Image (cartoon, rainbow, N blue to C red):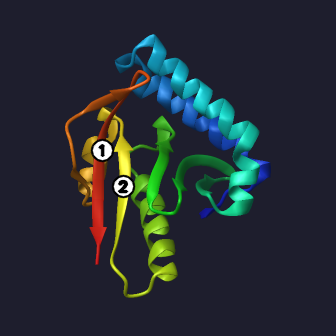
């Protein structure tokens, strides 16, 4: 089941993101990059309630047996800021289901209007985003130790 994450599930969503990051992504980052990501997650816990209330950020969780096993988040609606799935649930279509939920939400807000979604994908997730239809807009970059590939998806 997919539903929007509220403050009661925010800590579990952040813990999931942290666990998946450290298991699959962190080894490819410098110490600075790992710290930048950790700081970002700490911010999530401290500031996210306000961002969720204002609509600046949105989070959805994929739940199984009342436990979050996948999470996707957007900022300013059109930018995917996080997407993580528990390692025990990879290759089950959870990332696709989460992405499709975000896409349906955006389409309902802008019926019939084209728009462009963006993501700064970790190198680990580039293939996933390409399967969703995203294309690279630049080569891999590094900012504060965070490695990413800028990508976009034009939705008509």
Q: Residues within 10 Å of mark 1 (few under 14, many from 20)?
A: some
- Residue at 39 percent of width and 58 percent of height: 96
Q: Is residue 124 left or right of residue 13?
A: left
- From the top left corner, tell me how far across and down residue 119 is, in percent: 37, 49
Q: Residue at x 35, y 35 (%)?
A: 122
Q: Is residue 135 left or right of residue 90?
A: left
**Mark with earlier residue (1, 2):** 2
Q: In this rendering, is residue 77 above or below 113?
A: above
Image position of 25 with respect to 100: above or below: above
Q: Position of residue 139 (x, y in %)?
A: 19, 37
Q: Nearer the viewer, residue 38 or 71?
A: 38
- Local crowd size for mark 2, using a 10 Å CA cut-off: few (<14), some (14–19), many (≥20): many
Location of the N terminus by quadrant is bottom right
Give the x, y percent position of residue 10.
Answer: 71, 46
Structural distance between the alpha carbons of marks 1 and 2: 7 Å
Location of the C terminus by quadrant is: bottom left
Say whether marks 1 and 2 touch (CB < 8 Å). Answer: yes
What residue would you read off at disc 1? 150
Q: Is disc 2 placed on a helix, strand or loop?
A: strand
* Residue hosting label 2: 118
Extreme residue toward the bottom, this view: 112
Residue 49 has which mark? none
Residue at the (24%, 33%) spot, across then down: 140
Farthest right residue in view:
8
Q: Position of residue 14 (x, y in %)?
A: 64, 38
- Which residue is depicted at the point 30% across and 44% down? 150
Residue 13 image-quadrant placement: top right
Q: Relative to the observer, which residue lies in front, 99 or 78?
A: 78
């Amino acid at each position: 089941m997919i539903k929007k994450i509220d403050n009661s599930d925010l800590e579990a969503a952040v813990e999931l993101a942290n666990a998946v990051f450290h298991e699959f992504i962190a080894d490819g980052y410098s110490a600075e990059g790992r710290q930048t990501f950790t700081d970002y997650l700490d911010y999530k816990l401290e500031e996210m309630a306000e961002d969720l209330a204002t609509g600046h950020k949105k989070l959805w969780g994929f739940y199984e047996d009342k436990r979050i096993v996948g999470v996707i988040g957007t900022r300013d609606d059109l930018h995917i800021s996080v997407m993580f799935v528990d390692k025990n649930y990879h290759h089950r279509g959870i990332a696709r289901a989460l992405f499709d939920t975000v896409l349906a939400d955006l389409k309902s807000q802008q019926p019939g209007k084209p728009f462009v979604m963006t993501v700064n994908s970790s190198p680990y997730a580039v293939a996933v985003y390409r399967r969703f239809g995203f294309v690279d807009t630049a080569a891999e970059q590094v900012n504060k130790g965070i490695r990413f590939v800028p990508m976009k998806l034009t939705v008509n």
